[in-house]
Amino acid sequence: MHMINTSEILETLSMIDHQKLDVRTITMGISLLSCISEDEDKLCANIYDLITRRAENLVKVGREIERDYGVPIVNKRISVTPAALVTGAIKHPVKVARALDRAAKTAGVDFIGGYSALVQKGMTEADRRLIESIPEALATTDLVCSSVNVGSTRAGINMDAVRLMGDVVKQTAANTAASGGLGCAKLVVFCNAVEDNPFMAGAFHGPGEGDCAVSVGVSGPGVVKVALEGVKGASFDEVAETIKRTAFHITRVGQLVAREASRRLNVPFGIVDLSLAPTPAVGDSVAAILEEMGLEVCGTHGTTAALALLNDAVKKGGVMASSHVGGLSGAFIPVSEDIGMIQAAERGALSLEKLEAMTCVCSVGLDMIAIPGDTPAETVSAIIADEAAIGMVNNKTTAVRVIPAPGKVVGDSVEFGGLLGHAPVIPVRGFSAAEFIHRGGRIPAPLHSLRN
């Protein structure tokens, strides 16, 4: 057993006090499979009752752990079984979204994720109904987050679902135009989605999970940045070792909080996700880490190599600190949520194409990127297809969370507030992909998917 000594405790306290180390989220995953009913009202009542019962003490326990250990816990969240798996017998799945929203508000959490469908190989009628209801669901709820998995390394890419999601993203933006297209900030399109991700907006409680689990997502870009300030001019070998040691400390904090939450809630411990999740606050930026390695600005040549080193070192350090590392675990690059990314985009150093290249080596994908409001649905679909292809071929999770900001053009900015920050609208290619997207069908799985 790893014994924590006094110097480690003092070092961790310094990380919390001065370097913005926090636990970004405690997320309780809840299976809804026991709630299934052919009666819409009964299904919604079952879901509300189960969630409010299971998560009754989640926020209270989170606050107690914050107080007892001095570790800030920024969000308390719930994830549920992908809703399309429980709405097969009903005609109006949006009623379930509203039941989820009511339950989340009663429980006092920040977000609830799982208004989701898994359609990497094909779509059931229930899947299609749920996907088509997403724009209305996100416009008429406050805390609900939605995700759709359109591809995987084993199944290929469902291009019918990709085409549909372009329309869904555009309609969601239109339905929430008064808030700058905020609904799109709560909608993620995945390839190779994971079942135990505690981070929003893509969290759901996978079909392979148990009845209930509690997982933790830690963060700490500021801690890594400060650690690298101590090795200026050193070789990349030393940079990697420094990041690994820092990630170990960060993950130990997450492991402690997850174990304690599990014990106090009497719910199984799921995983620690050790992703470096930035915020718009100064000193809490992944871009700043990359620049600390010697780049003039994030997005210049060398950025992808720096991010690859960071992502790998974070995983290697974190995996030694917890027996159950999971989720996405690495570095996130959400543009609107990272002050360094925002500034790089405003300076013209970060393009959509450069961000896409960076997603080949980071933990997720094109995240919280504002694009012009008049971007065609087929172009949004094509962006999703490109990102899904990266995930499929590289056997990794990729995702798209773009906001076609209604009425906005390149050079404008969209304000979301809170952890979601603000995003400069960046250009997309003006050439059409409509004919490509309207072919439909499936892009076959790559040869290396045949692993058996």
Image (cartoon, grey):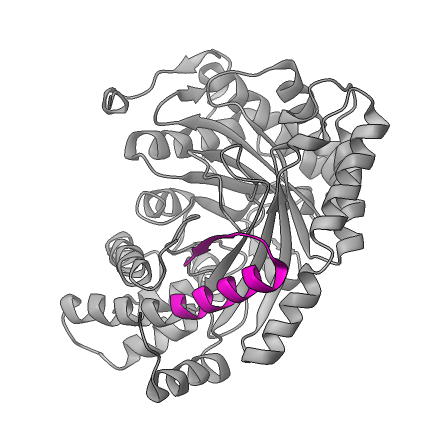
Q: Is residue 31 left or right of residue 152?
A: right
Q: Is residue 186 left or right of residue 149?
A: right
Q: Is residue 245 left or right of residue 279?
A: left
Q: Position of residue 220 (x, y in %)?
A: 44, 69
> Visible in this render: residue 87?
yes
Name the image quarter holding the C terminus. top left
Name the image quarter holding the N terminus. bottom left
Residue in the picture at 69% in, 19% down: 88
Residue 436, image quadrant: top left
Please determine whether, in this image, residue 64 is positioned above or below residue 388: below
Please determine whether, in this image, residue 128 is positioned above or below residue 424: above
Q: Position of residue 329 (x, y in %)?
A: 39, 53
> Visible in this render: residue 141?
no
Marks counted in the figure total 0
Q: Nearer the viewer, residue 14 or 163?
A: 14
Residue in the picture at 39% in, 53% down: 324
Decide whether residue 273 is among the magenta residues.
Answer: yes
Specify the segment rendered in magenta: 251-274
Decide whether residue 422 is among the magenta residues.
Answer: no
Q: Position of residue 194 (x, y in %)?
A: 45, 39
Q: Nearer the viewer, residue 80 or 139?
A: 80
Please determine whether, in this image, residue 14 is positioned above or below residue 176: below
Q: Position of residue 255 (x, y in %)?
A: 44, 64
Residue in the picture at 54% in, 79% down: 69
Residue 8, image quadrant: bottom left
Q: Nearer the viewer, residue 362 or 404?
A: 362
Label the magenta part by its dominant secondary structure: helix
Residue most extreme to the right: 41
Please determine whether, in this image, residue 279 is positioned above or below residue 330: below
